[in-house]
Image (cartoon, helix red, strand yellow):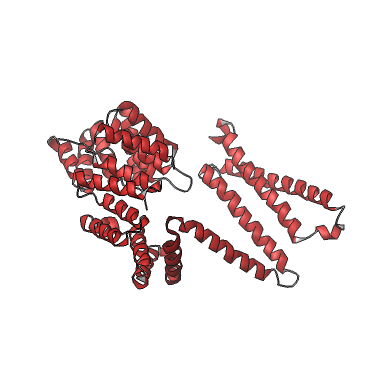
Amino acid sequence: MGRMIYRGGQGGMGTIPGGPLGKARYALSNGHADEAERIVRKRLERSPDDTSARVLLAQALLQQGQAAEAAVEARRAIREQSTNVDANLVLSAAMLQRASLRGVPAEAEQAARRAVQLAPKQAKTHVQLAEVLAAKRDLAGARAEADEAVRLEPRLAAAHLMRALILLSDKDPEGAIQAADTALRYDRTMAQAEFIKANALLESRRYDESLAALDSAERSNPLLLTGANAHSLRGRIYYKQRQFKKAYTQFLQTQLLNSRLRPLAPVLAGVNMVLVGQFGQNAQFAWVFLLLAVLFVILFGISFIPVVGPWIVAALVLALIAVTSFGAVRQARGRILPAAVSQKITVVVAGVMAFAAVTAIAAVIISALGTNVFHAHELRTPLTFVLAGAAGLAGSALGVYLLQRYAPAGRRG
């Protein structure tokens, strides 16, 4: 469904003062982040130590999707004024936007908790922490923070919006609908609440109402519904209504947004329509199962090639194991090899040595276990090749990971 777009501590601005910073805040509150950025950059040219302007610049950058730049400005503001609540909120939101398959960066939660510690009675700090915890799938913790935000400021639409998002993630669509309606009661322009409500209504099988909520969200904020999530949601609704032609059109639009796979868009759109239409949020698991099934069929077919077929299959399996093993290293560390060239050489050498040693040990063990059952030539098969090679690759990946994690600080730089 996509992550909420948090505005980095703008909630509850109250009366906006005059002057350049007042104009910048007004521009931000009306969605003109580029104008706010122009104003505060001019201000910072004259007063580079103005922390308030620095925080506003970070907020403007965040609204424009420049998460990395927003984080840089927020960190600088925190160095200048460590107790600045909004700077911590912007930093948390910026790091959350940079979350990936590796998970939510620790800095996102640290900054959110720091904001709560500095301002425990401000609802917006609890909203931000709730969003971070929800992204980490700590739904119980996220719900507690969202409930606290509602208790502190019952009329804060963002708090009810966050509750709706959490309840939907926690498989409580009816609760999510109620929370979204409450958010809309306090802010009729909150298109994100309509979008979450549309998802919840779909989960409740109220398809016509879901489509109406999605249409309402589009009227409130057309830009919200130009991405893949919106097309996919509309396609799911049409699929459930058995309007398959309309559903396919929406999934095709979704696929066309991925420029790398445009040539395959018509086929992938059809497959996505069926998988997402049938499995909804669990479609990714269906995709994995389908790809594994296709891979198995391909490998099974290759195995029938005389003489070399089984060895080709073994090589392909080892290639997949290598990608998986070192992909896990990338996910855990952010990269497979360190940045410095000298350190890269050390890690590569260590990885090769670990591969050779573990593969040899595995081969010896397989040979020792198998000699009582098989003849020596029968052990030289693609299966033993895969088993020994898989052990070596796993050992190599583990060695690369451990060397980078536990190497002395001086060696890591």
Residue 332 is at least partly visible in this image = yes
For the point 40% across and 48% down, which residue is it?
171
Instruction: Residue 102 in the image: state x and y as whole percent.
Output: 48, 45
The image shows residue 55 at horizontal and vertical percentages of 27, 36
- Taking the spot 28% from the left edge, 47% from the top edge, the residue there is 178
Q: Nearer the viewer, residue 69 or 233?
A: 233
Q: Quadrant of residue 57?
A: top left
Instruction: Indicate the position of residue 243 as horizontal and vertical percent values.
Output: 34, 70
Q: Nearer the viewer, residue 155 or 86?
A: 155
The image quarter containing residue 6 is top left
Image coords of residue 306 (percent x, y): 74, 73
User: Left or right: where does residue 208 sit relative to residue 335?
Assistant: left
The answer to whether residue 335 is seen in the rendering is no
**Vertically, is 46 above or below 307?**
above
Q: Residue at x 72, y 64 (%)?
A: 311
- Relative side of 52 to 130, left or right: left
Residue 54, picture quadrant: top left
Q: How many labels sit on residues? A: 0
Q: Is residue 27 above or below residue 407?
A: below
Residue sitting at 56 percent across and 47 percent down? 328
The residue sitting at the left extreme is 18
